[in-house]
Every structure is written in structure tokens, then in C-alpha cells.
Image (cartoon, rainbow, N blue to C red):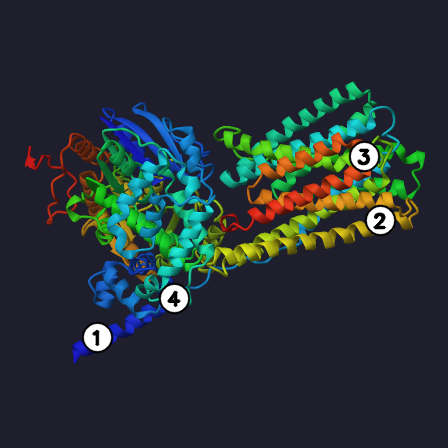
Amino acid sequence: MSSQLTTANNDGALAELAERFRAVCESAVDPLEVASALEFDGVSDRVARVGYEVADVFALARLLYAQVLRRPADPAADDHVQAGRPLLHGLLYALPAACFPAAGALLVGPGVLPALVVALLTGWGLSQGLAAVGYLRLGTSGLGPARRVLRVGLACCVVAVAATMTVTAFVVHARPLVLAFGAGEGVYVLGACVLLVTGAERWLPAALAPGITAAAVFLADGKPPVLEHQTWVALATTPLLACAIAVAWTARAGPRLGRLLNRAELLGAVPAIALGLLAAGLLSFPVAAGASGHGGGNVGALIASVPLALSMGLAEWILLWYRRATRRLLGLTDDPRWFRRHAGLLLLAALARYVTGTLVIISVALDVAVLSGQVEVSATILLSALGYLLLGMAMFLVLLLQTASIRLVPLAALAAALGAELALRGDGLVVQVAAPAALLLTVALYALARLGRAVLHA
Amino acid sequence: MKVALAAEGTYPHQFGGVSVWCDQLIRGLPGHEFVVVALVATGVEPVRWELPANASQLVTLPLWGPPPARPRGSRAGEWRAGEWRGRGRGVPLAVRELVDVLLDDAAAARFGTVLRDLHQYAMTRNLTATLAAEQTARLLAGTWRERWPLLAAPRGVRPADTRPTLHDAVTAMRLVEHALRPLSHPAVAADVTHAVTNGLGALPALAAKWQHQVPMIVTEHGVYMREQYLHLRNPPFGWPVKDLYLRFLAQLCALGYQEAEVITPGNVYNRRWELQLGADGDRLRTVYNGVNPDDFPELTDEPEAPTLAWVGRIDPIKDPETLLRAFALVVAEMPAARLRLFGAPPPGREDYLERCRALAADLGIDGSATFEGRIPRIRDAYAAGHVVVLCSISEGFPYSLIEAMACGRPCVATDVGGVSEALADDAGIVVPPRDPAALAEACLTLLRDADRRKSLGAAARQRALEHFTVDRAVRAFDEIYTLIGSGGRVPPADPGNPVATTVTTVRFGSSV
């Protein structure tokens, strides 16, 4: 009788324990996993003997594992794509463009265009390299060491921008104010890059506020000469503020541990710098070369370049969507061929999303320009906009390939496109449309071929 | 004698118990030359320990980050041929074999041969690129699909519910590729390789054994596999991946135990696990962690107010919440009692400290229970209490306990890990974990009884000096190195005294 009671009590205790450890047992791969969980929860050999009358915790785990059916839970899905951050990025890329018309009076004299192109190339190239190093350090060592390397990198890059601009201004005989504007442009891009990498881009609107507000007021008032100097001071405040916020934000970097830069980080920076230089070159070429290919301005290109910068935020958001969608796709099949087909369709869907969004943005920009009387719709303007749309699509695919660590061929394609534009610049708008079209075709076919691989998406 | 000491994620890049132990071992054996082989995450981790003079070299093997470089002596052309990215060439035989053993429960016996072949392959070809290739993932996915009904049945899962996907295949192969990166580095030639953990940490020792016939020793402070089970309880990937990867690690641990000339768990509690995981009981020699008695001299004075001292990380695994609840019961009986907690939360878990503070406030003991943070001289923490309390829900063989024992402080500790073997029957009081009433009762008993405190403290100190000193541990390894390094074998353990730490020298089967 007593033995029966004990057995009944044990059965009850065991059932209670099985219920307590149900989730563990349902997803355990073997009884030892259950044993580790039991011990972790304080069930020792002594408890197993006294409470459940089995030899030890391993025997108890075997009982529980046998009693509970396996029903493994799926890992928590992380499928939500937040649009806010990428779209903020788009605004942050595009807003500085508003400073250019306000600074018109500054940007006079010889060598303005070469100086601004050099500023763009230097700023983009260095900032892309700095971002690559920052992201690598963030991934390997965490936020503190990333702040440290970005802080030192920012100082070095600012010096490099200042030196490059000084030499350029000397060579092209640009005025000191042109030199200052170009340097400010580069410094802003670098400060913004540090804040973006460290997840502090929320502070960038504060840096942009003085320059953008002053530029907006100045332009809305019809560029009154009395406000010129105040506007320039406000414009200068923006890069200085961006840099100051970046320095303050990276102040809590922790002690220096190990080498400042390692070989992998230096090697990682090289393709990023190349991408920055090539992208800046392709973006600025139509503006610098003009519709004729021999300079003389290109209003259409100027109008289309701002929506393109804005569309990069959209591109970032679609890129996140695409990455998540392909990962979901991988989880739906065990057939690589099925995955390749559907991944190709997803790529086309992503491109279609980007085209739709960018067309809307360019259309709005053109409408605003036309309605405000700044331009009239013409074939030149539409062709310039088409060239930028094609370039944006190609850049979107290049970014997508970069996120899959595919760099060499996209960079070669970008270099070839820029080379073709430079070599055939005399063909004007024809090459400014044909080169991005060829680039898009090359990169799209390459992306379709490469991005069907499962190993690039898990 | 040249000893290659292989550690994973600890010495000399991180602080912690295992790193303290490694440093003590190297410094304690100045007559031996050490090469430290450190498995690290990415290779950019700073070295936090100054290596002793007899540590002649530090070899760093990153598991993540950039892939391993081409080994010296291998041909560049051949290596590039190994940088094979699924351009229609067949998957190399060694990798096919790996996929086969990963998906065959009956293939455990071949696991060692397969890893050995992979190591040989990696000395001339790019193993990392081969394992990361699309073709390899496809091979795994295809084989997994075919064998899944056979694999699912013994695991008690319905094949249709948990069918492995392409995502699972890619994820699993990525985990295995990173885990096997130590095989892509040339083995360190030494007289003995000492892996201070099993699992991935044993790979450099296995490679040295295969490549240079170097005998190996495996020491486990915590049981590697047990920690992996806990770590992967709620993994960020699907169940088939968890199943495959844990089985891969279990096979690796079994191979480590099988290839080791001697296995030295840090306590008998670990020994139970090692036997379950396939270790041969005859090769097990428990060598306890030790403290330097000079750093923990006997404490004779006691604080004025009746005080409990606690030392540890403010972390759920140390369960300070049960201690706070127990202390509330103590205060109800003894209003003058105090509780002093020394230690800080790990980075990122500061919220848990706040939770404990809030609990103390809720229990009305926030005036008498104080969180004092880290203390420069740990001995002062033990001096601060009449009784030292350890209330963890999981432990290996805690340093804080043997340090307090060496100081002669009476201890109340939960029955987890190696605690009960540290305290034995007469050197402290052991209570069940997560039981505030039992913990409070034991603490009150000692706080009220000065004679009992004195006798338990004396017994604890005597036991610590007898069994748990650095000298003793170092001496045991000195004997093991000398014996194994000269081709000798450690004799079978005395079944009646499994915790013996002294090695009786047996050379070629005969006592010396």
C-alpha cells in the first residue's frame, strides 16, 4: 500500500516536472539537453533521487524526454522592415543639395566646377572608406571600439579633405570661398557618415537645420544681398555642427585596445573608397559635362540629381525588404532550383519597386521645377532625367550586390561606365543615357546570375 | 618540455576563472615552455594578460572574421583550385564524407577519420571556401532531404513538421565551416598539447596529434557540451540546424575524449557529464582548481554586526534574488543582520541589478542589504561577513567558494555543480537551490552560533589547504606533462577514489 502511494506520488511529481519542462523537452535534441536544463534550474542528482526516486539527473532527463513529444517551436521571426530609418537617410542624403542654390554668390570665379567635383569625390570616397572600417569594427568589437576608430578616422579624413581642397584650389585658381564651400561639403559628408554608422543619425537634422533653414529663407526671399553673409555663416555652421556632434558622440569610445586598424579593415576600405569615387564620378559627370558634353550647364541633370539622392533612402528600404524576402524564400524550400527562379523574380520585383518610387520622386521634382518657372519641359531635360533614373537603378543593384559581398564585377562595371562617359563625353546626352543603360543591363544580368545562390542569402 | 596550451575564448584575451587558471599554470611551471594557442572570435581582440616569460609564443586562431590565410609551404595554384565556388566541379571527397557523417547517426566511428582528412585537405586547399560554396550547401540540402525521415523518427519528431529547408542547410554549413576553421591552420609542434576545453578548443590538439603525433590532454572546467546545450536552448535558427550542430559538437567532444591520453575534469561533477558524453572512465583524473593560500590568509576577526557576505556576478544564474528573499526571513528573526553583496552585473545587464534593488526595496530590506559593486581586493569581501553565502543555480567549481574556505570563513552554499564536493560533509552547509527558507535557516544557524562558525571555518580552511591549492594543481599537471610527453600512460583511476589528484607514474604499463 505504502509503495503504491509512493509510486503514485512520484508519478504526480514527475508529471508536474514534465509540465514545468514541457517547452524544453519539446525542442530538445536528446535527453542530455533536458539534463542540462534540469540542472540549470536547480534539479541536482540529490533532488532526482529524493524527489523522483531515480538514480540521477540523467535518468530523470531520459524519463522526461520519453514522456514529452517533440514539437520544436520555430525561431522568432524578424520580418518587420522599418521604413522610417532608411527614408530619413534619403532625406539626409538629399537635403544638403538645397545649400547649393543659396551659395550661388559664393560659387563664382575660376575653377568652381572642378573644385566642387573634387570635393564630392574626396568626400564620398573617404566617407565610404570610413564607413566600411566603422562597420567592420562594429561587427567585430562593438560600439566602443567602432567609435574610437571613427573618431580617429574622422580627424584624419578632415585633414585629407582640407589638404586636397587646398591643393585643388591652388591648381584651378579657385577663390578661398569656393575652397571653403568644397571643404565644408566634404566635412559634412564625413561627420554624417560617423553618425550614420554609430546609429546616431537622429542628430543630423540638428546639424542640417541652420544651413537648410537659412538657405530656404534666402531663396524664398529672392536672394536679398543683405542676407548673403548671414546665409553663408549659417551654411558654414552645418558641416561644423555635423563634425562637432560626431566628435561628441564618439567621445565615449573607451580605452584603446589593440591596434588602431588591422589588415582586414584596411582591405575592406579599398573597395568602399572605389565605390564612393566611382558613384560620385558618375553622379557628377552629367552636371559637369553639361548636355552638350563640353560644359555649359545641365539644368535637367541638376534637377534630377536631387531626387536621385533622395531615392537612395528608398533604395535602402527596398534593399532591406529584398534581403528579408529572400531569407524567407530560403526557409520555404529545400530545392535550390526553385529558390533560384523565385529569387530572380524577387530581384525584378525589388527593381520595379525602386523604379516606381524613383519615377514618382523625379516627376514631383520636375513638376515643382516647371511650376515654379525654373525650367520648361524639353527633350534634353527628360533625357537627363532618364539617364539619372537608369544610373539610380544600376546603383541600386550595385548596392544590393555589395550587401552580398560581391564587389569586384560591380566596381569594374561602374569604372567602365565612367570611363565610357569620359572617353565619349563629346557625344553629350547620348553617352549620358547610353552609358548608364549599358551599366544597368550588365549589372542586372550579373545580379540575376549571382543572386540566385542560396549561400548569399542566409 | 614544450607544451601547447589551447584555449577557446578565454586566455589571454579575456578575464575570468579559466584565464586565471591558465595563467597560474604557466607561471607555476617555469621549467616548461608554453605556446598559447588561442581560439578567438575575430582576431582583433586585444591581449588582456601579460604572458609569462616561459610562454614563448601566442598563436591566434580566429573562428569568424576573414578566412584563414594560405599555410606556408602550400602551393598557391593548388590553394586557388581549392577556392572553388561551385563552378561545376565535384564536391571534394573529404567534404562529401563530412556531409555523410553529419547526417548519419551510425557514422560516429568515422568522424575522427573525416576530420583528419579535412585537416589534410586544408593544408593544401582552401577548406573555408569549399565549405562555404553553393555546391556544398546543395549537397547538404539534398542529402538531408533524402535522409530526413530516417533522422526524424528516433528524435520523436514528425518529418513533415520540421523538414530541413535550404535556409537550414546554408546556416548549418556556415556554423560547421566556422567551427572547423582551426583545422585550416598548421598544427603547433610541441611535446604535449593541453586543450583547456573540449569541443572546438580540442581541434588544435587533434591536428597536432594527427600531424606530429603529439599526445593530448583535455581539461574541462565547465563541461563544454553541457554549456552548448544551454547556449542553444532557444537558438536563432530552426530545429534541424540545432539538432545537426549539437550532434556535430557532441561527436567532436566524444572524439576529444577518445583521442586524449588523459582527461582532467575540474571536479567530480564534471566527471559525471564526461562519462555520459562518451569519455573512458579510466582516462579521467580530477584535478581541482586551486587558490594561492598566500593571497587568502586566515581571517580571525569578524565584523560587529551579524553579516552575510556574497561575492559574484549580479546575474540570474547566481540567483541573488533567492538570497534577498532568504535574507528578508533572516532579518525577521535577527533585525540587526546585514547582507553585503560584492560584484557587478555583466555589461548590458545593468537592468538586472536594478531588478534586485527593487526586490530588496519591496522586501523592506534595502537598508540592511547593500550592493557594493566590485571590490579591489577580493579577500576584503570575505572578511566583511560572518558567513559567506553562495546561492547560484548553476556552477562548475566556484573559485569564490574555495577562496572563502581558504580564508577560514564558514560557507552556506547551494547544491549545484561541484559545491557539495568542495564543502564535503564538514566544511560548510549545503542547501537546495531556489529555496529561500532553507537558505535562511542555514544562515541563521551560523549567525547565532559562534562555535559552529569557528569549527566550520577551521574545517573549511583545512580542506582548502589540503585539496584546493594552486601548488597541488600545478604539481599534478607537471607530473602529467612529464609522463605523457615522454610516452608514458596515466594509470587507470582507482574506482574507490576517483578524485585523486596525484599521478602515479606508469611507464609502458609498469609502475616506476
Can you tell which of label 3 and label 2 is closer to the viewer?
3
Q: Amino acid at mark 2?
A: Leu
Image location of residue B29, percent across then percent down: 24, 28
Mark closer to the chain start, 2 or 1: 1
| Label 4 and label 2 in one chain | no
Instruction: Find numbered disc 3 in the image and state the secondary structure of the residue it sits on.
Output: helix
Label 3 crowd bin: few (<14), some (14–19), many (20+), radius 10 Å: some
- Residue B461 visible, this orientation: no
Q: CA distance from mark 3 to mark 2?
A: 24 Å
Return the residue at label 1: A7
**Host chain of mark 1:** A
The one nearer the camera, B238 or A31, is B238
Residue marked by disc 2: A366
The residue mark sitting in front, 2 or 1, is 2
Q: Judging from the image, what secondary structure is the residue with disc 4 in?
A: loop
- Sequence order check: which comes first, mark 3 or mark 1? 1
- Image quarter in which the C terminus of chain B is found: top left
Return the chain for callout 2: A
